[in-house]
Amino acid sequence: MLPDEMRIVITGIGLTAPNGNNLSEFREGLLTGRSGVSEYEIRYFGKTLAGICKFEVTRHQAKRDARRGTRAGSIGVYCANEAIIDSGMDWSNVDRSRVGVYVGVTEHGNVETETEIHEIRGYDYDTSYWSHHHNPRTVANNPAGEIALNMEITGPHYTIGAACAAGNAGLIQGAQMLQLDQCDVAIAGGVSESIHTFGIFAGFASQGALASHADPTQASRPFDRNRNGIVIAEGGCVYVLERYSDAKARGANIIGELVGYAMNTDATDFVLPNSERQAQCVRMALQRARLEPEDIDIVSTHATGTENGDTLECAALREVFHGSKKTFFNNAKSFIGHSMGAAGALELAGNLPAFQDGVCHATINVDELDPTCELEGLVLNQPRETKGVNYILNNSFGMLGINSVVIIKRV
């Protein structure tokens, strides 16, 4: 057991998802089967499907700042402010020089660059019409920087580029910085503005990995035999992390404790995942937490709805969790699509209320389970009551073979 000043706990959550703008709404959507996927159209690519967030941008941000900044920045600002409110922290009396901002992103700058090229096209590509806001919009630290500016945070801020493992990576980085005494409060998680770049839709379409379905709400269908790809989504989830000793001293409501985490790399392919390396990453996180597979109550899977991705992750999970009778497996992308850099943080959040209500939300849209995705304990189409939830493990994997796993304990 770590000393209290080295234990890292979650004391606040702020999020926006395609089916909810706070944890309560998001959780309700997951328990009632409410999808957030709808029809969407984007320039050059045309009509498609996406998970679109509908949060109130000006709730915590002036219109001028929203226009000057980015969609990812606005998502981050909304989530970070909501997380601080949720934490019950007396923000007006917090030493902002001891607050760090660590935000995971899949990519950043594509939206803004595409927009500028589209705009100057109307001026015969005269670059004198290029926006003077372009550089601060496209630097890699933008989403974290917009949070820091908005909340007058003078401690360290930066983004963590970790593809679709970035949400978990942000959480891990925040915890490590607290343990290194580089901050006293960490605002950590992930954000994504991916649906606003036509390039990501075109890229997945060129790979044959973009989902389609007559009913948008049924398009995202991990584990289903008839799945046909990814539904791209935007979103964000930011956590307030503190040392257990500090949270306890101020009487904070502790949502959970980060007891295990791991990151590794496949080093085998640009896109195709490696089941062996994924299983290794899960085992590393369990080892750090001093847990056995049968200690885990819920595993939040990364599964995106692609044939290879789902099948290989399930193979890794069968390898690690075979014989574990109490472990349930679910997936949130079936409700909201793949929120890229936000996915790990957002999907974890959707499971955390299970510490209180003991319910494992389902994976929806599974009409015919692919035999290669069979897992004992896979929760399909309807939520499942458990005998109590003490540990949640969250998988999040990304392109270029980056893998991340976090384990949260009920406190």
Image (tube, grey):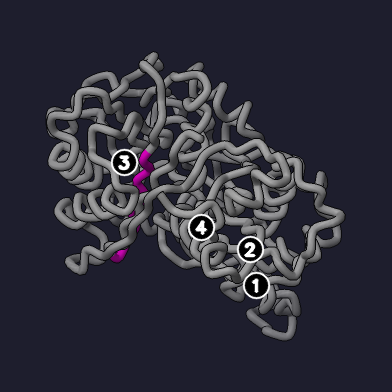
Q: Nearer the viewer, mark 1 or mark 3?
A: 1
Residue 43 location, quadrant: bottom right
Callout count: 4
Distance from disc 1 to disc 2, alpha carbons, whole Å, reads: 6 Å
Residue at image point 66% right, 56% down: 71
Task: Answer with left or right where residue 56 lies relative to residue 235.
Answer: right
- Residue 395 magenta: yes
Q: Which residues are magenta?
A: 393-400
Mark 1 surroundings within 10 Å by alpha-carbon count, few (fewer than 14), some (14 through 19), many (20 or more): some
Residue that badge 3 annotates: 303
Residue at image point 50% right, 16% down: 32
Of marks 4 and 2, which one's residue comes earlier in the chain? 4
Distance from disc 3 to disc 2, alpha carbons, whole Å, reads: 28 Å
Q: Which mark is residue 6?
A: 4
Residue that badge 1 annotates: 156
Q: Position of residue 320 (x, y in %)?
A: 17, 41
Determine contact: label 1, label 2, CB under 8 Å.
yes
Task: Answer with left or right where residue 293 lies relative to residue 162.
Answer: left
Of marks 1 and 4, which one's residue comes earlier in the chain? 4
Task: Answer with left or right where residue 213 lies relative to residue 277.
Answer: right
Residue that badge 2 annotates: 101
- In this rendered view, identify the residue nearer to me: 178 or 12: 178
Distance from disc 4 to disc 3, alpha carbons, whole Å, reads: 32 Å
Inspect the image, locate mark 1, and give the three-letter code of the amino acid beneath it: Pro
Element class at badge 2 = strand
Q: Nearer the viewer, mark 3 or mark 2?
A: 2
